[in-house]
Each structure stands twice: as structure tokens, then as C-alpha cells.
Image (tube, rainbow, N blue to C red):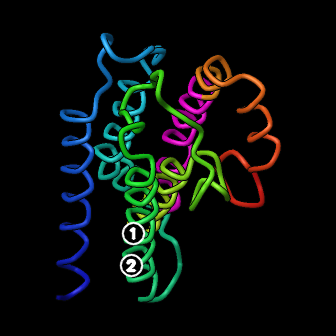
């Protein structure tokens, strides 16, 4: 399959996957302590708003990234990597993964696999996807849009999520926090 055909499939697949997660993997109040504070809607709004704004931004700020033909194939590879990281993180959490910030009584702190490297590998996967989308546009303004706005929403979501996890697990989560980075392996 040609890379020009693969990109839309990756984008539509990503969107469809996120919609399916929202429909079928949402915590219910009867079974979970929900502490989302609207972060699910903020995150969705910012991500999809940024993606839909890309054409407008590229038209009004035509600041091309001066690179050769390798940037779009690189972006495709990054998107595949980001989706793989996100999917792996979600599958690793299993029943404990929800699209809204929530904890439940039988939940435990996941420390294996990607969770031994960063506390929020699912969001790390999203960040890789944001970078891929921005690079695929070959436009500096679009790259900035895809990195800054969604990242701020992710950081707010992480803040809310970590407060909920500290409340649920206390010293155990604080200890885990000291031994792993929050979002970017070895950096933050």
C-alpha cells in the first residue's frame, strides 16, 4: 500500500478507535469513583479542534518545513508507533482503563511493561501521534498547533488523573511516581 493511501487510514482508524473507546470503555458511577472534572471533553475538543483547524492554519500561515520527501514517510512511521504505544498501554491496563478519570476498588497500580518506563504511556502514545500529524503537514504553524494545544490538554488531564490516583493509592502511588517519569521516558 502506498504511504499516501496509508495516512488517511491511520487517521480514520485512530479517530474510530477513540470513538469506540468513548462509547464502550467509559466508567459508570455505580462501579467507579469518577473524578474526571470534564477532562475527557476538554481533551477530545482540543484534539479534534486542532486537527480540524490544520487546513485553515496551513492556508493562513504557509510556513513550510524545508525538508525533502522523507518527512511524510517518517510521520507515517511515527503515527504507527504512537498508535502501537497507546494500544499496548490500554490493553495492559485491561479493565482498569477508562476514558474518563475513575478508579475502582479492585484496581491496582500497573508497574509492568510500558508502565515501568512512564506513568502515562497511553498519553505518551497520543503525544507521538500529535507529533506525527504536525510533521505530516510539513508546516511549522501546524506542527506548533498539534504539539502545544493538545499537549496542554493532556497535561491537565494527567494532573487530574494523578490527583485521583494519589487519593486512591496514597503512598504506594507516591512511591511509584518517584521511580518513573510522568510522560516522556527519561525526561518528564
Q: Residue furthest top?
A: 30
Nearer the observer, 178 or 42: 178
Nearer the observer, 136 or 140: 136
Residue at left offset 56%, top offset 27%: 161
Residue at left offset 23%, top offset 50%: 17
Q: Position of residue 51 (x, y in %)?
A: 33, 47
In three-dimensional space, the C-alpha distance between marks 2 and 1, rounded to whole angstroms, equals: 5 Å
Q: Quick check: is 22 in the magenta stretch?
A: no
Quarter of the image containing the N terminus? bottom left
Q: Which residue is mark 2?
A: 72
Q: Position of residue 180 (x, y in %)?
A: 75, 50
Determine whether label 2 and label 1 are within 8 Å by CB: yes
Q: Is residue 153 above or below residue 187?
A: above
Q: Which residue is mark 1?
A: 136
In the rendered view, does 45 fall on the left or right side of 158? left
State how many labels appear: 2
Q: Position of residue 138 (x, y in %)?
A: 43, 70
Nearer the observer, 35 or 13: 35
Report the magenta residues as a range: 139-161
Amino acid at each position: 500500500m502506498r504511504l499516501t493511501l496509508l495516512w488517511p487510514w491511520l487517521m480514520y482508524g485512530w479517530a474510530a478507535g477513540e470513538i469506540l473507546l468513548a462509547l464502550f470503555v467509559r466508567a459508570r458511577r455505580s462501579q467507579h469513583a469518577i473524578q474526571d472534572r470534564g477532562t475527557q471533553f476538554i481533551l477530545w475538543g482540543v484534539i479534534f479542534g486542532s486537527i480540524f483547524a490544520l487546513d485553515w492554519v496551513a492556508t493562513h500561515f504557509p510556513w513550510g518545513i524545508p525538508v525533502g520527501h522523507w518527512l511524510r514517510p517518517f510521520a507515517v512511521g511515527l503515527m504507527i508507533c504512537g498508535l502501537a504505544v497507546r494500544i499496548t498501554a490500554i490493553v495492559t491496563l485491561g479493565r482498569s482503563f477508562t476514558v474518563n478519570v475513575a478508579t475502582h476498588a479492585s484496581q491496582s497500580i500497573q508497574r509492568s511493561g510500558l508502565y515501568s518506563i512512564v506513568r502515562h504511556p497511553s498519553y505518551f502514545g497520543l503525544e507521538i501521534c500529535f507529533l506525527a500529524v504536525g510533521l505530516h503537514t510539513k508546516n511549522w504553524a501546524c506542527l506548533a498547533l498539534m504539539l502545544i494545544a493538545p499537549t496542554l490538554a493532556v497535561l491537565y488531564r494527567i494532573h487530574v488523573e494523578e490527583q485521583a490516583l494519589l487519593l486512591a493509592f496514597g503512598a504506594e502511588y507516591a512511591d511509584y511516581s518517584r521511580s518513573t517519569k510522568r510522560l516522556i521516558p527519561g525526561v518528564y
